[in-house]
Image: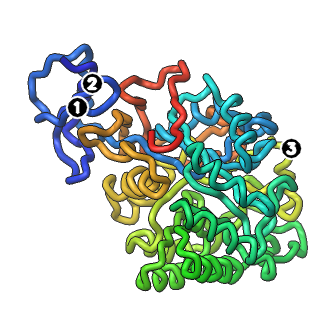
Amino acid sequence: MFDLVVRSRRVLTPEGERPAAVAVREGRIAALHPYEALLETAEDVDLRALLLLPGLVDTHVHVNEPGRAHWEGFASATRAAAAGGVTTIVDMPLNSVPPTVTCDALDAKLRAAEGRCHVDTAFWGGAVPGNVEHLRPLHERGVRGFKCFLSPSGVEEFPPLRPDEARRAMAEIAGFGGLLVVHAEDPALLAEPAGPTYREFLESRPGAAERSAVELVIRLAEETGARVHVLHVSSAACLGPLEEARARGVPVTAETCPHYLTLTAEEVPEGDTSFKCCPPIRDEANRDRLWDGLARGVLDCVVSDHSPSTADLKVPDFAAAWGGVASLQLGLSAVWTEASRRGYGPADVARWMSTRPAAIAGIPRKGAVEPGYDADLVAFDPDATALVDARALHHRNPVTPYHGRTLRGAVLTTWLRGRPVDGEPRGTFLLGEK
C-alpha cells in the first residue's frame, strides 16, 4: 500500500526520461513501476504527457529574516519557491540581522523560520573578520558551509575578508572538511560608478575583477586544501581559471544564475534598477560563453541568488540603487525558456538546478526521482507560456526584471515529501546530514 502514486509518460529519472509510476510511502520514493502498473495506493495522480521533475534545490537564497523581513521572509520566500518548483532552499547568512556568523545568530534564524517554511530549508553560515573560532561550532550545528565576500557586501554587519583572513578561514574549514562559498570580486578592480546609467555601473564592476578574485580563491584552495565554491559567476573570463584548476585537481565548483543566462546588458532599460545585481548582467556574447561553460561542466549549477529588497530601494539610479535580482519563483521557467531555445532538454535543466546543487551543498536524498530519495516532485508543463506580472508573485515585494516578459514552462503542482504544497507550512530544517 502506497500513500501516493504519480504517473507520467515523461518521468525524469537519473537514467533518463521514461514512462513510470512513482510510488511514495512515508514521504520517500519507494519504487518506480511501469506507467500502467496497477498499484494499491491512497491517491493516484496521472500527469499523462506532462513532465515529472525532481524538486529543484536552490542553494542561493537571501531570505533576510530576522531583521529585514520587510524585504523578504521565510513564509513569502518559501511560498514563492514552491510555486516555482523549488522544494529545498539554502538560506544565505546575510542580509538578516544578526547575520548567521555565530551559533547564537543561527538560533535566532531558526526561531524566525520555525513554522513558516513551505519547503525544506537549510542554512549557510558566514565567514567574516574575527569569527574563525565560530566556524567549527556552526559546522557542528549543521550549516552547509560558509559564505564570504572578498569585496564589500553592501551591508555593514557582514564585512569582507582580506586575502590573509580568507586564507585563515579556509585553513580552519579544511580542518573539518567544510565548504567555503565565495562572492568573488577583487575590490582593487572595482570603482564607484561614474554616473547613474547602466553602462557606467557595468564599467565599474568589470569581468577582470571577478577573474582576479577567482584566481585568488583557487590559489588559496590549493594552499589550504579547502573545498571552495564560486558564487554567481557572471563573467565568462572566469571559465578559463576554473577549468584549469579542475584539471589540476583543485576542489573548486562554481555556479551561475538565471539572470546571467537569460538577460543581457544590451536590453537593460535605463533607470530600471530591478536589473541591478553584483556582479552585473553582462553582454550577449558573454552570455553565450556562460552557456558554453555550463554545457561543458565548467559551471556546475544554476541557482537564483534571490536577493530582494523593498521597492523604494530600487531608485532609478544604478549607482545608488540596492543591488539584487528577485527571481526565486521564476528561475525554472526563465532557464527553460532559454535552454529549450538553445537545444537543451529537461534532463540538463534538472541536473543544473536540482541534482548538482544538492550534491555541492551536501544535502542527501534530494535532487533525483529515485527510490530512497525524498518524494520532492514537480509537475511541469514545458510548453505552457505565461506573461510575468510581478504583482502576482509570492515574493514579498513586486520587483523583478522579468515583469512583462513571456516565459515558457509552467509549474502545475509541487509535492514536498509526497504531499502537495497547499498553503500549510510543512517544510523542515535540514541541519547536518538530515
Residue 153 shows in the view: no
- Residue depicted at 32% across the width and 46% down the height: 368
Whole-angstrom CA distance, mark 1 to mark 2, is 6 Å
Residue nearer the viewer, 121 or 164 = 164
Residue position marked by numbered label 2 in the rendering: 25
Whole-angstrom CA distance, mark 3 to mark 2, is 47 Å
- The earlier-in-sequence mark between 3 and 1 is 1
- Which quarter shows the C terminus? top left
Residue position marked by numbered label 1 in the rendering: 30
Q: Which mark is residue 312?
A: 3
- The earlier-in-sequence mark between 1 and 2 is 2
Left or right for 167, reference 18: right
Whole-angstrom CA distance, mark 3 to mark 1, is 49 Å
Local crowd at mark 3 within 10 Å, few (<14), some, or many (≥20)? few
Where does residue 315 sit, x and y in percent of width and height?
86, 52
Q: Are marks 1 and 2 in contact (CB under 8 Å)?
A: yes
Local crowd at mark 1 within 10 Å, few (<14), some, or many (≥20)? some
Q: Choose mark 3 or mark 1, whichever is in front.
A: 1
Label 1 SS: strand
Q: Are marks 3 and 1 in contact (CB under 8 Å)?
A: no
Label 3 SS: helix
Residue nearer the viewer, 356 or 275 = 356
- Residue depicted at 83% across the width and 62% down the height: 318
Q: Amino acid at mark 2?
A: Arg
Local crowd at mark 2 within 10 Å, few (<14), some, or many (≥20)? some
Vertical relation: 344 (above or below) 43: below
